[in-house]
Image (cartoon, rainbow, N blue to C red):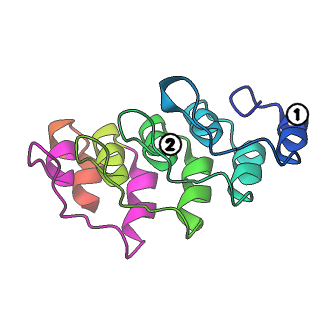
Amino acid sequence: AAEKGHVAILKLLLSRPDVDPGSKGRAHMTPLLFATNNGNEDDIVKILLGNDRAHPDFADKTGRTPLSLSVDYGHKGIVKLLVENKTVDPDSKDSEGRTPLSWAAASGRLDAVALLLEDDRVDPDTTDNPSRTVLSWSAGSGHEEVVKLL
């Protein structure tokens, strides 16, 4: 339901105590990961974030969180919802040591980079497993405006 954007069905499922909105399906994806991956903005993501069993930082099999996927795919509304939710770790690292800021910078998502930099929990100087910085990812991808912001 979350993956396909079926709001009414999602609400019905979440009303059942035997349904775990933090459960992982194929590729270790939770309903929130599916929703953010597919850009199912406001309604679905808001519903899931409002459910304390949804676990907004559960990662997929590569360690990517809903925020990491959202910034990479340019889902601005979802990024804003996730960053504003203080239970979400905006500086979580995936299996490669990359953070949401790293993905946003590499993808040239200026709005997401600016939003993440406003959060004191985000370290713009962090490095990933190959020791690349956020600035390195942005510059290497040719995103001049992001480089200026960093």
Q: What residue do we see at 12% from left, 47% from top? A: 132
Residue 95 image point, x, y percent: 27, 41
Residue 52 image point, x, y percent: 69, 61
Please give the range of residues in magenta.
109-138
Q: Considering only order in the chain, which callout, 2 or 1, is on the residue closer to the N terminus?
A: 1
Residue 121 image point, x, y percent: 37, 72
Mark 2 packing: few (<14 Cα in 10 Å), some, or many (20+)?
many
Residue 33 image point, x, y percent: 56, 38
Quadrant in the picture for the C terminus: bottom left
Mark 1 or 2: the one toward you: 1
Determine whether, in the image, residue 6 is placed left or right of residue 31: right
Tell me: residue 110, above or below residue 24: below
Three-letter amino acid code of the residue under disc 1: Ile
Quadrant in the picture for the N terminus: top right
Three-letter amino acid code of the residue under disc 2: Ser
Determine whether, in the image, residue 102 is placed left or right of residue 35: left
Mark 1 element type: helix
The numbered dot on residue 9 is 1
Question: In front here: 46 or 113?
Answer: 46
Q: What residue do we see at 88% from left, 33% from top? A: 9
The residue labelled by disc 2 is 70
Mark 1 packing: few (<14 Cα in 10 Å), some, or many (20+)?
few
Determine whether, in the image, residue 103 is placed left or right of residue 11: left
Confirm whether the magenta stretch covers residue 130. yes
Confirm whether the magenta stretch covers residue 36. no
Q: What residue do we see at 74% from left, 59% from top? A: 50
The numbered dot on residue 120 is none
Tell me: residue 142, above or below residue 149: above
